[in-house]
């Protein structure tokens, strides 16, 4: 026996386009119903081309035959009339449905007569004779078609995976139905799309693959429309839903980008540190300059003060010199008056000392002591000013005593 596990499984069905065979009156539901594989049919083939209700026609024929039999054996006019009326009604109903054709919304019907195509009609209710048959119903809506590409080579020989959603519309139902079937068009269209997308991938680099979602693929729309034009199909849009190189390349790319980002961050940190250092140096320089300017201003102020003081001293010296010069001139001009002034000054000092009993007189030589006693005698002869009792000094008040203590100091020559 052959091991069943060694027998390869059949390839999964990736067909996206299909057709269905249902009654004409159920075509609208069939266009909106998915099959077991999730596919919606794009072509409906009526199960029964003849639209005449054969059961009703046969019933009417049987009723007519029954009316003949009844009239032959039984002469009942009422029963015969009733049988004939029922037969006519069945015949009308059987033939009436065959004249009315209802095409669902979003579909085109192909009509044939004697097995040959006559024309196509749009959606709606149409009256047709029974000998005009509806052979196919073709959808006119946009049809999405998924085109995955695995390991497509880029310009720099990097394999990438791309998934694209292409939408198309059947604009000529006659060409589509009579030139190719739905399943065959699925394979042809899949191959044409993959060939066009692989050609596009060979024109971009690996770094541009991730940006395919943002690129305008209008040129591919034109090229694919040209390829499927013989089948009455028009491409309406191409959208790249997924585009990314293989995982190994993405990891390497992420590592390179991370390294570049880290280097950029390191450069930014170095530049920031340099700017901070430059700012610190500029701030320190500004502080030094401000301190120097402040010290310079202080020195200038001190210099101005010293200069002002110097000028003041010069002015005071000049004034003192002028005063002494005037005094000397006065002394030379009035020597007696000058001597008198000196004596008066000494007398004032002696009087002040004589009025203070605690004053101590410091003399430098023996002659000074003699002069002091002589001054005392002079002061005793001078009358004192009157007091508050009538302006006369009392006779009993003795003169001030001489100094109690004298100190003799000899000054070195």
Image: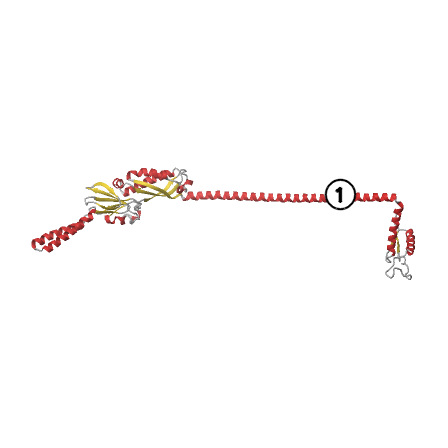
Residue under label 1: 311
Element assignment for label 1? helix
Measured as percent of width and height from the top left, residue 99 is found at 20, 47
Measured as percent of width and height from the top left, residue 283 is found at 60, 44
17 displayed left or right of 373: left
Measured as percent of width and height from the top left, residue 25 is found at 24, 49
At 34% from the left and 38% from the top, the residue drawn is 222
Vertical order, 295 against 389 (above or below): above
Number of other residues with Cα within 10 Å of mark 1, as a class: few under 14, some 14 to 19, many 20 or more: few
Identify which residue, 200 or 132, lies in the foreground. Answer: 132
Residue 15 visible, this orientation: no
- Rendered image quadrant of residue 176: top left
Identify which residue, 38 or 300, lies in the foreground. Answer: 300
Measured as percent of width and height from the top left, residue 273 is found at 56, 44
Residue 28 visible, this orientation: yes
Identify which residue, 324 or 229, lies in the foreground. Answer: 324
């Amino acid at each position: 026996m052959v091991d069943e596990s060694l027998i390869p499984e059949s390839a999964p069905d990736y067909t996206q386009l299909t057709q269905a065979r249902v009654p004409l009156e159920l075509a609208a539901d069939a266009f909106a119903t998915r099959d077991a594989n999730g596919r919606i049919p794009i072509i409906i083939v009526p199960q029964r081309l003849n639209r005449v209700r054969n059961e009703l026609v046969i019933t009417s024929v049987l009723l007519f035959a029954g009316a003949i039999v009844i009239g032959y054996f039984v002469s009942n006019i009422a029963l015969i009339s009733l049988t004939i009326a029922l037969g006519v009604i069945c015949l009308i109903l059987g033939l009436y449905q065959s004249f009315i054709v209802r095409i669902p919304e979003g579909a085109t019907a192909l009509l044939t007569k004697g097995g040959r195509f006559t024309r196509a009609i749009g959606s709606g209710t149409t009256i047709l004779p029974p000998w005009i048959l509806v052979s196919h119903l073709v959808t006119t809506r946009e049809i999405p078609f998924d085109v995955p590409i695995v390991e497509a080579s880029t310009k720099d020989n990097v394999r990438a995976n791309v998934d694209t959603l292409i939408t198309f519309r059947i604009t000529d139902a006659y060409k589509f139905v009579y030139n190719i079937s739905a399943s065959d068009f699925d394979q042809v269209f899949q191959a044409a799309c993959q060939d066009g997308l692989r050609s596009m991938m060979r024109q971009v680099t690996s770094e541009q693959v991730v940006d395919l979602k943002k690129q305008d693929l209008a040129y591919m729309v034109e090229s694919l429309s040209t390829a499927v034009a013989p089948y009455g199909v028009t491409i309406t849009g191409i959208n790249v839903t997924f585009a990314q190189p293989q995982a190994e390349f993405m990891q390497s790319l992420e590592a390179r980008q991370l390294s570049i980002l880290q280097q950029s961050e390191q450069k930014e940190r170095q530049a920031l540190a340099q700017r901070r250092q430059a700012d610190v140096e500029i701030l320190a320089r500004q502080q030094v300059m401000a301190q120097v300017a402040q010290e310079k201003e202080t020195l200038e102020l001190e210099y101005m003060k010293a200069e002002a003081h110097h000028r003041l001293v010069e002015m005071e010296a000049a004034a003192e010199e002028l005063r002494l010069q005037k005094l000397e001139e006065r002394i030379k001009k009035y020597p007696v008056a000058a001597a008198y002034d000196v004596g008066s000054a000494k007398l004032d000092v002696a009087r002040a000392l004589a009025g203070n009993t605690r004053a101590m007189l410091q003399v430098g030589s023996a002659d000074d002591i003699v002069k002091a006693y002589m001054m005392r005698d002079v002061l005793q002869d001078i009358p004192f000013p009157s007091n508050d009792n009538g302006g006369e000094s009392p006779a009993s008040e003795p003169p001030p005593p001489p100094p109690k203590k004298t100190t003799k100091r000899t000054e070195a020559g």
